């Protein structure tokens, strides 16, 4: 039985020695994807045949913002490792991110839709018809019929039309007309399409700003997540190297007969476990790295190096009362909710107007001129004025529409109230989380300092045989966990601060970003 135990012990020592030899391999793997020469852009074979664009392409191109033109192209990123700060990552993402490019295009279409609605208040000129006829040596040129109309914000319409069958001789006439509703369709209800068009465009602008803020959150959170993965990997690698050094010393002590075989096996088993953690952390870091390159719009073959320095100082924030007041006034989602509440209220006005009597005033005046080679006659028709009255009877459909509009408004008002309560609760809780997170951050710093002292004392005790390798490995693991917890608390603290500024609608100012080429509604 004794010989069997000796043989098993020999195999165990051989296995752990091989594991240590494998552990001595260099663990330096690239984070970026090696450039295989495969283009990351759509090729001409993948793209459809290009079209010949006209004014639509010029309108789209002229209204798309051109920010940060001084930044390099993603494909021009040098293969040499380039340092990238969090602000540089934001600038790159705001220029090259596909989500922002799509938001730019959507904003241009919203702007054009708004301009189209507002253009209905401008004079509308129909097509100009020019006719030319020649018969038996005699030519005749006529303009046909041309008309122009002008809509007003009170529902009225002014019209002017002109027609002739010959510029030199023939009959020409012009007519001036006025149509003005006096009951249904008169007043503010006639102005609702233009008011709602302005509001919808403001909502589109606010949604655009929200998309920018969402991208900023994604970029900064991703950058901090990359820092966390990088530091966790470095902390685990440092723990592995320290464990590797301890195993080397333990192996020498074992050969000199100063320690037991079980102590050596225990140390090498801990080393193998730590190396497995290093490999897992490296895998997580590589995945986070390549995903972040796509987030900021860089080529996946790019080679960057991030700044792993974390903010350790306390970030200055307003008081809780100021935060709540600012969030109620500037939170984007809440402002959009209030705008939607106004639209719901205006639907009641439109539904009430649809149930009113319809009384329209019409007036027209026509002047006709007939001319020949030597005679010109003018006929002035009298001014025609009329009233048209329509009285709805048993108007069940419009009553149903009014009831539905009123119910929808009440629902929107309740939702707006709940949104305000949720916003205040979110701001308050986030404010508290910032306070507690900062306290946890200070505790984590102290925990790292104490864990380092505990491990140093444990190594000293092990040297003089006052403790076991198991306790040293436990203390080393505790130090690794304390360092990773510190990094996690630092990231959590920054995320809570940014979440607060998101609720305040002030994220762009927090990062010193200004959307200069957008209207003042966003500034």
Image (spheres, helix red, strand yellow):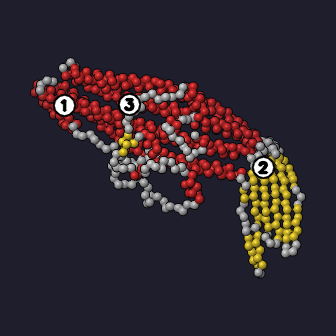
Give the number of the disc on residue 487.
3
Residue 264 x/y as whole percent: 18, 27
Structural distance between the alpha carbons of marks 3 and 1:
30 Å
Q: Earlier in the sequence, mark 3 or mark 2?
A: 2
Give whichever of 7, 365 is nearer the camera. 365
User: Where on the picture, by quarter, is residue 223?
Assistant: top left
Q: Residues within 10 Å of mark 3 (few under 14, many from 20)?
A: many
Residue displayed at 48% across by 59% down: 48
Furthest residue in direction front, as rendered: 70
Quarter of the picture holding the N terminus: top left
In the figure, is residue 95 to the left or right of 283? right
| Direction top: furthest residue | 466
The residue at the far left in this view is 3
Q: Residue 390: in sight, yes or no?
A: no
Q: Are marks 3 and 2 in contact (CB under 8 Å)?
A: no
Crowdedness of circle 1 by 10 Å Cα count: few (<14), some, many (20+)?
Answer: some
Residue at point 50% right, 25% down?
432
Residue at 53%, 28% (x, y): give it. Answer: 318
Residue 156 has which mark? 2
In the figure, residue 292 lies in which quadrant? top left
- Left or right placement of residue 44 versus residue 169 in this view: left
* Mark 1 lies on residue: 248
Classify 216 as above or below 243: below
Label 3's element? helix
Q: Which x, y percent locates residue 39? A: 39, 54
């Amino acid at each position: 039985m004794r010989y069997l135990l000796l043989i098993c012990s020999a195999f165990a020592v051989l296995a752990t020695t091989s594991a240590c030899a494998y552990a001595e391999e260099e663990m330096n793997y690239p984070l970026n994807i090696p450039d295989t020469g495969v283009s990351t852009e759509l090729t001409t074979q993948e793209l459809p045949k290009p079209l010949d664009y006209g004014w639509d392409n010029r309108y789209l191109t002229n209204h798309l913002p051109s920010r940060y033109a001084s930044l390099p192209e993603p494909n021009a990123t040098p293969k040499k490792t380039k340092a990238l700060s969090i602000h540089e990552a934001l600038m790159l993402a705001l220029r090259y991110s596909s989500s922002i490019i799509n938001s730019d295009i959507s904003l241009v279409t919203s702007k054009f839709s708004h301009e189209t609605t507002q253009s209905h208040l401008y004079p509308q000129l129909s097509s100009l018809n020019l006719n030319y006829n020649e018969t038996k040596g005699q030519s005749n040129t006529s303009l046909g019929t041309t008309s122009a109309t002008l809509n007003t914000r009170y529902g009225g319409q002014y019209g002017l039309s002109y027609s002739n069958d010959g510029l030199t001789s023939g009959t020409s006439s012009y007519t001036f007309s006025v149509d003005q509703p006096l009951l249904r369709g008169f007043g503010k209800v006639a102005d609702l399409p233009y008011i709602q068009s302005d509001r919808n465009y403001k909502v589109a602008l606010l949604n655009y700003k929200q998309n920018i803020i969402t991208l900023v959150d994604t970029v900064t959170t991703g950058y901090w997540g990359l820092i966390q993965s990088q530091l966790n990997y470095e902390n685990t690698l440092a723990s592995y190297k320290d464990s590797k050094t301890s195993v080397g010393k333990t192996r020498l002590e074992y050969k000199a007969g100063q320690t037991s075989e079980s102590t050596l096996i225990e140390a090498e088993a801990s080393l193998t476990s730590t190396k497995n953690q290093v490999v897992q952390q490296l895998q997580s870091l590589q995945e986070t790295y390549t995903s972040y390159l796509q987030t900021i719009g860089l080529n996946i073959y790019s080679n960057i190096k991030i700044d792993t320095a974390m903010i350790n100082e306390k970030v200055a924030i307003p008081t809780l009362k100021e935060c709540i007041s600012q969030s109620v006034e500037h939170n984007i989602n809440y402002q959009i909710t209030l705008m939607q509440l106004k639209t719901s209220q205006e639907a009641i006005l439109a539904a009430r107007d649809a149930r009113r009597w319809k009384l329209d005033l019409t007036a027209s005046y026509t002047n006709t001129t007939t001319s020949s080679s030597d005679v010109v006659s003018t006929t002035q028709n009298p001014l025609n004025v009329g009233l048209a009255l329509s009285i709805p009877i048993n108007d069940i459909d419009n009553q149903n529409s009014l009831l539905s509009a009123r119910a929808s408004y009440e629902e929107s008002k309740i939702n707006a109230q709940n949104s305000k309560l949720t916003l205040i609760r979110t701001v308050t809780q986030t404010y508290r989380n910032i306070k507690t997170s900062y306290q946890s951050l200070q505790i984590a710093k102290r925990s790292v300092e104490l864990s380092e002292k505990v491990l140093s004392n444990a190594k000293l005790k092990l040297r003089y045989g006052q403790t076991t390798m198991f306790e040293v490995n436990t203390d080393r693991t505790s130090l690794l966990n304390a360092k990773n917890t510190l990094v996690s608390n630092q990231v959590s603290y920054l995320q809570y601060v940014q979440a607060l500024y998101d609720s305040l609608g002030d994220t762009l100012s927090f990062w010193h970003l200004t959307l200069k080429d957008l209207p003042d509604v966003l500034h």
